[in-house]
Image (tube, rainbow, N blue to C red):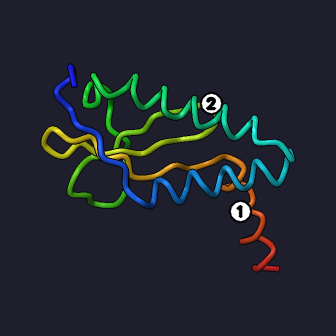
Amino acid sequence: MASGYAVRYLPLFYEDLEGAFTLLADESRESGEAVQLAIAVESAILERIPRAEGVIPYHSKKKRSYPYYLINVGNDTVFYVVIDNVVEIRRFIHRRRDAQKSRTKHAEKE
């Protein structure tokens, strides 16, 4: 890889992405939107790799071993860390899934 970074995807990232695909498929009854999302996410990740540490780290209230960085893909977010020369893609947060979780939490409180 020209950038000097290897890329590793955690299983949790794939689980998050699969959840977004399922949600999109349920809502739209077509896989086209899910495929577009996959292409956009992969493109954004590959575009970021050469300058993985060249952006401001995500400010977290929690003490972490490695700083988190984020990639915005539309209204969705990919979180990653850099460990030595490895970019570890950790999470994918989908805007619709978060809204759904938020509504569920509020319903449970009532």
Q: Nearer the viewer, residue 53 or 20?
A: 20
Q: Give the residue at x 66% y 36%.
A: 35
Front of the two marks 2 and 1: 2
Q: Give the residue at x 69% y 41%.
A: 34
Q: Nearer the viewer, residue 67 or 7?
A: 7
Q: Give the residue at x 62% y 48%.
A: 94
Position of residue 5 measured from the top left corner of the image (x, y, whole percent): 21, 32
Q: Identify the element where label 2 is drawn.
A: loop
- Tell me which amino acid carries mark 1: Ser
Specify the farthest residue to the left.
Answer: 84
User: Which residue position is annotated with label 2?
Assistant: 74
Q: Nearer the viewer, residue 81 or 6?
A: 6
Which quarter shows the N terminus? top left
Picture mark count: 2
- Tell me which amino acid carries mark 2: Gly
Q: Are marks 2 and 1 in contact (CB under 8 Å)?
A: no
Q: Quadrant of residue 23?
A: bottom right
Horizontally, residue 25 falls left or right of residue 74, namely right
Position of residue 3 measured from the top left corner of the image (x, y, whole percent): 21, 22
Q: Give the residue at x 65% y 51%.
A: 20
Position of residue 104 measured from the top left corner of the image (x, y, whole percent): 76, 70
109 to 88, vertically: above or below = below
Position of residue 36 measured from the top left corner of the image (x, y, whole percent): 66, 31
User: Which residue position is annotated with label 1?
Assistant: 102
Q: Identify the element where label 1 is drawn.
A: helix
Q: Quadrant of residue 49?
A: top left
31 to 5, vertically: above or below = below
Horizontally, residue 75 falls left or right of residue 33, namely left
Horizontally, residue 56 falls left or right of residue 70, namely left
Which quarter shows the C terminus? bottom right
The answer for how far apart the CA atoms under marks 2 and 1 are is 20 Å
